[in-house]
Amino acid sequence: MAERQEERGASTAGREEERGMSTARREEERGTSTAPRGMSRRRVLGIGGALGLMAATALSTSAALARRPSVTGAELRSAVPLPPPYQVPLPIPATLEPVAPGRYEIVQREASAEILPGVRTPLWTYGGTFPGPTIESRRGRQITVTHRNELPVPTVVHLHGGRTPAASDGYPTDLVLPAGWTGTTAHAGHAAEPGHGTQAGHGAQAGHGTHGGHGMQAGHGMQAGHGMKDARAVVTELTRDYTFPLDQRPTLLWYHDHRMDFTAPAIWRGLAGLHIVRDDAEEALGLPAGPRELPLMIADRAFAADGSFLYPSLDPTLRERPGVQEPYLAGVLGDVILVNGAPWPVHEVDAARYRLRVLNASNARHYELEAVTDDGRRLDLVQIGADQGLLAAPVTHRLLPIAPAERYDVVIDFSGVPVGSRVRLLNRLGTGRTRDVMAFRVARKAADDSRVPGVLSTDLPAWRRSDAVRVRDFAFRAGQMHGGRGWLVGGLPFDPARADVTTGLGDVEVWRLVADVHHPVHLHLVGFRVLSRSGRPPLPHDVGLKDTVSLRPGEAVEIITRFDGYRGRFLFHCHNAEHEDMAMMANLEIV
């Protein structure tokens, strides 16, 4: 049944969906079906699973989403032959060299690459590669990255997970315009001086979907909007300096496009790269390092007949009209799994420990990872870090769920695997080709002096509920807005002119987050700890300091954080990139 659903491009797949559809049939038999009259359940599932139910009937979370589908989104099918798995070598993104101490330069430009063997794919890139070059930095050593936009549309850069001042955080309306831009996404005449974006309050338009324009219409995707101005936006032409103090725990960050209304297709076309923060204390632990430390950016894509990335944009130029075609309102899934830009790659390893720095850079796809030997044995995935750095102590998993934008730092030990055999990294939530991720081929015996110490760090914050000065509640749900339907936070679509949350610098708060379908919720600037899931203790993978938490359908999650670092305007939002583009963001003012 899961395969038949996948063939239809249905929004949910896997074991949980089969159980959910059985529940739906029982509801129909009892006369309690939640599908609207005149719309078949197959049709409802085809327009976004639980989203279809929510949008068509405005159902409560408990009624529409108790079946907990394993995926939110609809899958595209590639129109070119796909290679067999485990044939293409795993590429390692190049490390970006500074142009001067503490200064880096990246040109955002169009390029092409051979991602599928024998097929050229046009890309939007950071520095001509996908993923972009990796930035290596040291804790507490400020760097400045100058981005030059040679793409045909405006861009914004966000360092995801960075403790970054508001001026460099990549607010969606702080655009970098290409030379000679004549589109209507921003008033170029009110922009800051060409160069570095140091002037505030230049009145850019907040995209085409802002406020009234994020509404999703059945059959039409996102409407064109009213072009509301954001009086606080800072717009520059051609270049912008982003300054990162990096006063934060060592961890894996990533940078990606964050342009208002067009984040999802820009990331899909290639605008993503890694940024690693290191410090002396972490390096003294004896963890696997050098060639035995592997960054793994996992992302799904689909390919059109001409080799380009297939994406259901309403406006393929990404200039005027934001949004996606109707079946993909819940999220866009691809049928090819890329790791560091390569399809189902293979990497030759020693029979030793390896450190895997795993990022889910997919727009909407969730994974449940496991490492399996050729004889069917599962290897331990020893988690040593989360989004915001090292754990206090290692946690061992056999299955590791990872939502869009989440990062996990894990150690895997190949020493007990026979030389010449493979270990496959599989996705338990996938079906067909999306079940495969990559493979490791154990090539040789080798000495290994690495270790995983029982104590990894002692600097994790110890916030308690009693420290919280307030508790807030936020619902992340589909809903009605301005004549259409959209993805809402607290019942409201995103509006850059509205302060959704105002808090004091240094305040500790508890937030309760409730979801209808899958929503990976990301807070800018700060890390947080997960306190509970639906009134129960956090799951094993919730350990540590995070900046993105995966809300499952019908689930309520409590988090605790301290709003420190910098004053200014920041964001929190769903990191299903299609949801984000369709209004599921909110403002966070720290005063």
Image: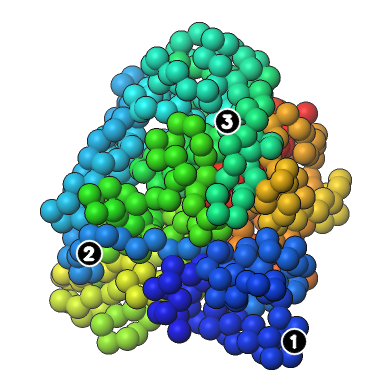
| Res. 591 image quadrant | top right
* Disc 1 to disc 2, C-alpha distance: 44 Å
| Label 2 neighbour load within 10 Å: few <14, some 14-19, many 20+ | some
Identify the secondary structure beneath mark 3: loop
| Mark 2, residue position | 82
Q: Nearer the viewer, mark 1 or mark 2?
A: 1
* Disc 3 to disc 1, C-alpha distance: 45 Å
Residue lying at 37% horizontally and 27% vertically, measured from the top left: 152
Placement of 454 over or under 498, stated as above or below: below
- Give the amino acid type for the residue marked by disc 2 in the picture: Leu
Q: Is residue 175 visible?
A: yes
Q: Earlier in the sequence, mark 1 or mark 2?
A: 1
Q: Earlier in the sequence, mark 3 or mark 1?
A: 1
| Mark 1, residue position | 31
Residues at circles 3 and 1 in contact by the CB criterion of under 8 Å: no
| Label 1 neighbour load within 10 Å: few <14, some 14-19, many 20+ | few
Residues at circles 1 and 2 in contact by the CB criterion of under 8 Å: no
| Res. 222 image quadrant | top right
Q: Earlier in the sequence, mark 3 or mark 2?
A: 2
Q: Which residue is at the far left?
A: 118
Q: Picture coordinates of residue 354 (x, y %)?
A: 33, 62
Residue in front for this viewpoint, 561 or 189: 189
Residue in front for this viewpoint, 86 or 117: 117
Q: Picture coordinates of residue 351 (x, y %)?
A: 23, 71
Residue lying at 44% horizontally and 60% vertically, measured from the top left: 333
| Mark 3, residue position | 207
* Disc 3 to disc 2, C-alpha distance: 36 Å
Identify the secondary structure beneath mark 1: loop
Placement of 459 over or under 586, stated as above or below: below
